[in-house]
Image (cartoon, rainbow, N blue to C red):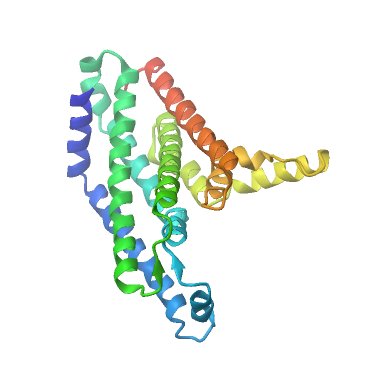
Amino acid sequence: MRNLIKMNLFRMRKAVSTWVLAIVAVAIAILDFGIMKIYVDDPFNWGLGEIIQMEGGMDMMKTITGFLRGTDLLIILAIFVVIFTNAEQKCGFDKNIIGITKNKWKQTLCRWLSAMIGVTAIMAVSYGTFTLLSVVFMNSFVLGDMLAYGKIMLIVYLFYAAFSAVFFFFTTVFRSSAGGLVPSLLITTGVLSLISKLLDLGANKLFNNPKLLPSDFFLEGAFSAVSNEASNGTLIRVVVTAAVYIVVALGLSMFIQQKRDVR
């Protein structure tokens, strides 16, 4: 397995798309910081800067986790996972090395682990850029509770892994970039959230103020519930939801690859 991962990472480093998407992720971080800086400095006299100063400055944890929970970076990672996963199937990489592993599911697992290494690297570069710019250029930045910040960051990363597993699953099923990218973009852009809202509406009609709604168990809905203000019970629920998505999406991907013929 280690050799398979090393081969995948070598191909990842050599791919032009990897570096292009990494540069785009950095550009997004710079752009998001610039927008935040405009709000804080308030050159258009919107009054937002005064509100932030009255609240004692900008909370580091809320600001940076808000950046990571945005759809911009998630879209970049969706494109990366789809391109990386499909390249192995499209370029005959599967067919050339399938005899080395003997178990096709193992190759699929190594492919996802390799994709997660790439996702982590792009996340780190983009997140590091945004954090560095914020610390250096934002005078009103307040560190806050670093322990709580670390806990939320771990949960956010778990959700990135869950989203990546779902993107990986669609690409494995359809064996094409388009087949993987279309449903992945529908998820990241929130188009499918309409379905969860309709289900929530139906649940509210059937039950009087239910404690849990169908959207709470959709990946996007659980992700939006991650915050420092969330109760421990809510955080446990969203962690379990993310873990279930990883297990199911990755398990189905390995099962499908094991059963199908390599072409």
Q: Quadrant of residue 159?
A: top left
At 48% from the left and 48% from the top, the residue drawn is 185
Which quadrant: the N terminus?
Answer: top left
Splitting the image into 4 quarters, where does residue 213 fall? top right
Image location of residue 233, percent across then percent down: 59, 39
Left or right: 171 as drawn, with respect to 202: left
Q: Give the residue drawn at x 45%, y 76%.
A: 40
Residue 168 in picture, x, y percent from top left: 40, 35
Viewer-nearest residue: 224 or 163: 224
Q: On the picture, is 105 further left or further right than 102?
A: right
User: Can residue 1 be seen?
Assistant: yes
Q: Nearer the viewer, residue 219 or 188?
A: 219
Residue ID at (20%, 16%): 100
| Picture quarter with the C terminus | top left
Residue 125 spot, x, y in % from top left: 28, 54
Residue 140: quarter of image? bottom left
Residue 122 vertical placement versus 53 (above, below):
above
The residue lying furthest to the top in this view is 102
Front residue (pair 36, 179): 36
Q: Position of residue 259 (x, y in %)?
A: 41, 15
